[in-house]
Amino acid sequence: MSSEDQQIREIRVHPIENGTVIDHINAGQALNVLKILKIPSSSSRVVSVLINAPSVHGRKDVVKIEGRELNVEEVDKIALIAPNATINIIRDFEVSEKDIVHIHSQIEGVVRCINPNCISNSNEPVTSKFAVSSNGRRTILRCSYCERIISDDIGEHLL
Amino acid sequence: MSFKDLHIISMKSFSRDMIDHVLNTAEMLEPIARDKAKSDILKGKVLGVMFFEPSTRTRMSFETAMMRLGGDVLSLGSVDASSIAKGETLADTIRVVDGYANAIVLRHNKEGAAQLASEFSSVPILNAGDGAGHHPTQTFLDLYTIRRESHLDGLKIALAGDLKYGRTVHSLCYALSLYGAEITLISPKELRLPAEIIEDLKSRNIKVTETESIEDAIEDIDVLYATRVQKERFPDPAEYRKVANSLLITPELLEKAKPELKVMHPLPRTNEIDPRVDNTKHACYFKQSFYGVPIRMALLALVMGALE
């Protein structure tokens, strides 16, 4: 391995002492994962992002956040845009917990309906609600109010 | 099967058995709708009528249905004269009106409004149209008309006009699929039925054919269901005229049809049906708007628990 390769390899997989590694994110969705985690505004910790990294299934994104463990709500949101993601909790440089994400059959208050004329987009005292289903690799959200479907660009409509 | 306190939001929550039960109940109540028999099974009950958008048939047939069964009607009246003009939410308005009424019929300009209302109401909500969404009582009355004037089993029906935006057509397609109807879709390419609805029908083993001309289908069908083609859907007036002409139903066109063919239209019509058709045995659209009364009587009596 050349010194340049070694340097690139270190940049890519540089271990973190404590924090979270979100692996197997669908290629191109890493920035939406950051949006879900409200990074950078929520934290001044070091965050590393790999986009289009080679993987056995083609390409993937990876996000590493130092000094932070995700809560359930954040993981549920990530599942919508990266249904194959794994969440690795790192403690003392070791993978302490490893979990796959789970897609719930109903979500509330996570995504805004794309239909501007949907009652959930008015000043009514309700949160958006969607029924979640899956069609192969695609996640499909159906608004519980107007039945409009969101599928390919869920990350664009996160609340 | 109990309909008591059931919200009537979308046809998708009804099975064929449930629809048949509503149609049977309407048939039983039809003499009362025609004022040939009397009933007061809804005496002492109040229907809250909340129309945020204009309506003639739906509103008046709901009110008549309630009165024919001995009940009373309480109307929101003009939106401008109500607290909605002060910015009151639909949710709050519903919570107020459900204290005054035993059921609420709601028409609103936003999709999902009836679903939202059902989440805040302790009395049944009957959706009388939510924006471009659902209008289930129209579908019930369409099915009732077909059953009374033609037949639902083995039906060959053509749906003509604006199949893209027409909310009545989408719900009707779903309901017809429960009866195994053979469906021909007649529309210009700009106004075709959305592909996902066609796919949905085909996945239910429904035979669906698409064409742009009524002439292609007229000889073989039992019911021709026309819908309004709105001029504003076409940027070019010449294109609108061409489409309107290709979808015009005339007595000459109907000479090629089966003698028992029925022409239906949810009304109001604009230029889809030549007025000369009104006097032919094929015309069924005014009967269709009357059938809204027994159907709405049935739904009101069922959800208020006056009938099982």
Image (cartoon, grey):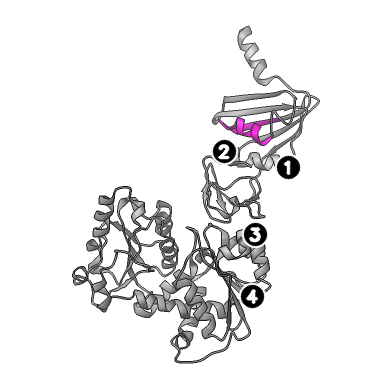
Q: Are marks 4 and 2 in contact (CB under 8 Å)?
A: no
Q: Which residue is mark 1?
A: A72
Q: Quadrant of residue B57?
A: bottom left
Labels 3, 1: front one: 3
Quadrant for the N terminus of chain A, please: top right
Calculate the distance from the C-alpha at mark 4 to the C-alpha at mark 1.
Answer: 43 Å
Q: Quadrant of residue B255?
A: bottom left
Answer with mark 2 or mark 1, whichever residue precedes in sequence: 1
Q: Position of residue A158 (x, y in %)?
A: 61, 41
Q: Amino acid at mark 1?
A: Val
Q: Is B52 situated left or right of B189 in this image?
A: right
Q: Which residue is mark 3?
A: B88
Q: Amino acid at mark 3?
A: Glu
Circles 3 and 1 on the same subunit:
no
Q: Amino acid at mark 4?
A: Ala
Calculate the distance from the C-alpha at mark 3 to the C-alpha at mark 1.
Answer: 36 Å
User: Does the magenta run of residues contain B284?
Assistant: no
Q: Secondary structure at mark 2?
A: helix
Asked if residue B308 shows in the view, the reply is no
Q: Position of residue B229 (x, y in %)?
A: 34, 59
- Position above or below: B32 against B265: below
Q: Residues within 10 Å of mark 2 (few under 14, many from 20)?
A: few
Q: Residues within 10 Å of mark 3 (few under 14, many from 20)?
A: few
The residue that appears at 68% across and 68% down in the rendered structure is B96
Calculate the distance from the C-alpha at mark 4 to the C-alpha at mark 3.
Answer: 19 Å
Residue A156, numbered circle:
2
Residue B255, numbered circle:
none
Labels 2, 1: front one: 2
